[in-house]
Amino acid sequence: MKIHSVIEGTRVNGPGFRFGVWVQGCLRNCPGCFNAEVCRMDGGRDVPVSELVRLALRQQYDGISVSGGEPFYQDDELSRLLDECRRHGLNTLVYTGYTYEELSAAGKHALRYCDYLIDGEYRREIPSRCRWAGSGNQRFLRLQDGKLAADLTALQDHSTDGEIIIGTDGTITLTGFVEI
Ligand code: SF4
């Protein structure tokens, strides 16, 4: 799977304590995109899905969050990653620049392995309605077997959180909503 990075422990990209995977590549060009580097189609590194699953099981995570970049560009790899993680008891959440309806119409297989979806392009002029979404047009959806089960957007509190993660190698990662 072509990824940009992983985060071994985050609490600001979905409910609970989560393993995070940031995939590489997105063509949407949303104004104000949080990370132009992650959008480059020629960047990133290939990591086997099995290795990502191994990392996801190294700690007691509640779930896995996949963001990017656009995860659904890699529908097969995303399906395998989410399916494996669910088999090991993790819940699954995916951030996408497409709407659920667009992905469903396109027949994206990975939808059936998503427990939660945060959908829609990032529009910085619309304030977020959900603590884990970047902008207010995005929804926090519960899926079951690929079908839309509930829109939970309004049930979340509206406060936003961010994290600054300092790696053992000195790298600094900002995630969520961090003002510096
Ligand atoms: S969909 Fe997300 S990653 Fe892609 S350009 Fe928009 S904000 Fe950036």
Image: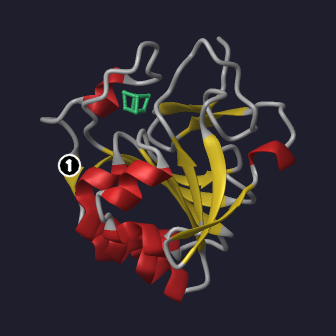
Left or right of residue 83: residue 152:
right
Q: Quadrant of residue 126?
A: top right
The yes-or-no answer for disc 1 within 8 Å of ligand 1 is no
Q: Residue at x 34, y 44 (%)?
A: 70
Q: Residue at x 43, y 82 (%)?
A: 84
Left or right of residue 41: residue 135:
right
Left or right of residue 130: residue 122:
left
The x and y percentages for residue 43 are 18, 36
* Dot 1: element: strand
Q: Quadrant of residue 91?
A: bottom right
- Reply above or below: 134 against 21: above
**Could one spot residue 28 in this view of the protein?**
yes
Left or right of residue 117: residue 32:
left
Q: Quadrant of ligand 1?
A: top left
Question: What coloring was used for the rendering?
Answer: secondary structure
Work out which residue is located at the far left of the displayed protein and give it.
42
The x and y percentages for residue 69 are 35, 39
Quadrant in which the N terminus appears: bottom left
- Reply above or below: 156 against 115: above
Work out which residue is located at the far bottom of the displayed protein and give it.
87
For the image, the number of numbered tags is 1
Quadrant in which the C terminus appears: top right
Q: Quadrant of residue 124?
A: top right
Q: Residue at x 57, y 47 (%)?
A: 118
Name the residue tied to disc 1: 45
Residue type, label 1: Arg
In the foreground, 21 or 8: 21
**Could one spot residue 6 in this view of the protein?**
no
